[in-house]
Image (cartoon, rainbow, N blue to C red):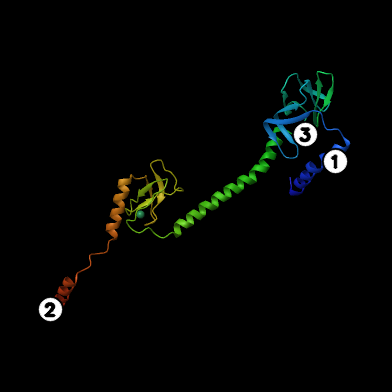
Amino acid sequence: MNRLSILLFLVLIVFVPVAHAQTVAPPQLDFSLNRDWGYGGLGGQIQGHFSTRVRGPDNLERVVFYLDDQILGEAEQPPFKIRFVTDDYPLGEHTLYAVGYTSDGRTLTSNTLHREFVSAQQGWQDAGRMVLPILGIVFGVMLLAAVIAWLGERRRAPISPGAPRSYGIFGGAVCPKCGRPFSRHWWAPNMLVGKLDRCPYCGKWSIVRAAPPDVLRAAERAELEAAAPPPVPTDETEQRKKDLDESRYLDE
Ligand SMILES: [Zn+2]
């Protein structure tokens, strides 16, 4: 359904009843169709299990439901409701309506509904035609988000050694190649004994399990020690070294 037909439909539901009311008496019974299970597309195409219901005056005694001029069913007590399956009737355009009988002998007519009965196959094809583009968009957005997350991770500033960090929902692992702890990636394939993941520090691939917190903390501390600058020589030792060097030259 394109935008123009939606607009036309809105115009019709707003203006037609107004115009109609002046010439034709409103239906005496309110006849409605409800989908129980199946397909109900835009444009009045239906397939599957449906129920019809009639609402009328309190003295309504009996309602006969019609499909074209064939009796679809009867209801003799409220809620005046019957069920039917579209597959039991020929495919194509149908008119649905009801006739009611009151205890004081009046015959009441309902509004009519026009529906096209379609095959299950066509119903699902039409549903697929509406749903597939939406699924396509959803998967496209997911893929885009994944690519952005991956690029963002590559660009992110490296965590300074020993810094406390959160390892995320997949847990942290200690790289068996370089020994640094890193967050296991959501995209890393699961290899039963662990995830085949890439260490962001040394870039090597290994199968890693989520390590317990104490192991991760130990790895963080090791990281810190490894990265600690070598002890700065004091002025005194520096001076002595210099003296030593100078004396060496003097000896020669
Ligand atoms: Zn590594």
**Badge 3: how crowded within 10 Å, few (<14), some, or many (20+)?**
some
Q: Visible in this render: residue 242?
A: yes
Q: Name the residue under label 3.
A: 115
Q: Position of residue 215 (x, y in %)?
A: 30, 47
Q: Identify the image quadrant of residue 90.
A: top right
* Label at residue 19: 1
Task: Report the mark closest to the observer, 2 or 1.
Answer: 1
* Label at residue 43: none
Where 24 falls versus 12 (above or below)?
Answer: above
Task: Report the mark closest to the observer, 2 or 3.
Answer: 3
Q: Looking at the figure, which quarter contains the N terminus?
A: top right
Identify which amino acid the numbered label 2 is placed on. Ser
Q: Please give the name of the residue rendered at 39% of the width and 46% of the height, measured from the top-left corner.
A: 171
Q: Distance between the residues labelled 2 and 1?
A: 117 Å
Q: Do the residues labelled 3 and 1 touch (CB within 8 Å)?
A: no
Is residue 222 toward the left or the right of residue 43 in the image? left
Q: Identify the image quadrant of residue 117.
A: top right
